[in-house]
Image (tube, rainbow, N blue to C red):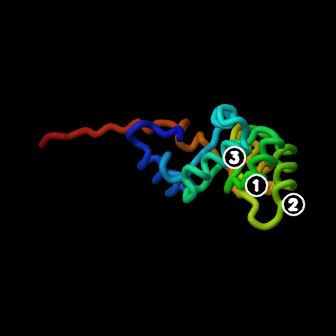
Amino acid sequence: RKTTPGLRALEKAAVAAGGGTNHRMGLDDAILIKDNHAVLAGGVGEAVRRARDAQPHLEIEVECGTLEDVREAVAAGADRLLLDNMDPEGLGQAVAEVRAAGQGSPKLEASGGVGLENVAEIVATGVDFVSVGALTHSAPALDLSMRVIGR
């Protein structure tokens, strides 16, 4: 997601070289249920159930913007929750509820509005992962030139 067309492999390798982790390389190795998918399926829970029926071997990650989304995704058996644009208080509540669900609860990933100024506060909520799209979609370009000098 959010990589430059034709440069996905290079950008993913750069993230890994810089110490980051790529949890998905493309659209074929996991399912990401976004808010529009949930609306079209009739809700988060139904979207998870349909995805699981269609591709039982793939990890299912669900974008959750509210605690109600979180509850539905957990109840439906999602493997990972993308906690999208939640403030630290909301993230903390989501973490507490999911951890209270016990063994087999999904991994939690904070995403949206993450920057150097707030990443420590986000990490302190107890999420398992912090997603930073700017690593690939907003990296500054490096201006290189190559000059050939004749003899």
Q: Which one is in front, 18 or 60?
A: 60
Please tell me which residue is depicted at 83% across the width and 42% down the height of the picture: 68
Q: Where is 105 relative to 147, above or below? A: below
Q: Which one is in front, 16 or 57?
A: 57
Q: Give how far apart the Cα atoms at labels 2 and 3 are.
A: 18 Å
Q: Pointer 1: residues within 10 angstroms few (<14), some, or many (20+)?
A: some
Residue kind at label 3, given as amino acid type: Leu
Q: Number of marks in the image? A: 3
Q: In this view, does 40 lie to the left or right of 121?
A: left
Sequence-first disc among 3 and 1: 3
Q: Give how far apart the Cα atoms at labels 1 and 2 are.
A: 14 Å
Q: Contact (CB < 8 A) between labels 3 and 1? A: no
Circle 2 — which element?
helix
How far across and how far down the image is residue 118, in percent? 76, 44
Q: Circle 2 is placed at which residue position?
A: 100
Circle 1 — which element?
loop
> Could you say which disc has been placed on residue 19 in the image?
none
Please tell me which residue is depicted at 87% across the width and 44% down the height of the picture: 89
Q: Circle 1 is placed at which residue position?
A: 127
Q: Give how far apart the Cα atoms at labels 3 and 1 are.
A: 10 Å
Q: In which quarter of the image is the C terminus?
A: top left
Which mark's residue is nearer the viewer, 2 or 3? 2
> Could you say which disc has been placed on residue 82 in the image?
3
Q: Contact (CB < 8 A) between labels 1 and 2? A: no
Residue kind at label 1, given as amino acid type: Val
How far across and how far down the image is residue 73, in percent? 74, 48
Residue kind at label 2, given as amino acid type: Ala
Q: Determine the image quadrant of residue 95.
A: bottom right
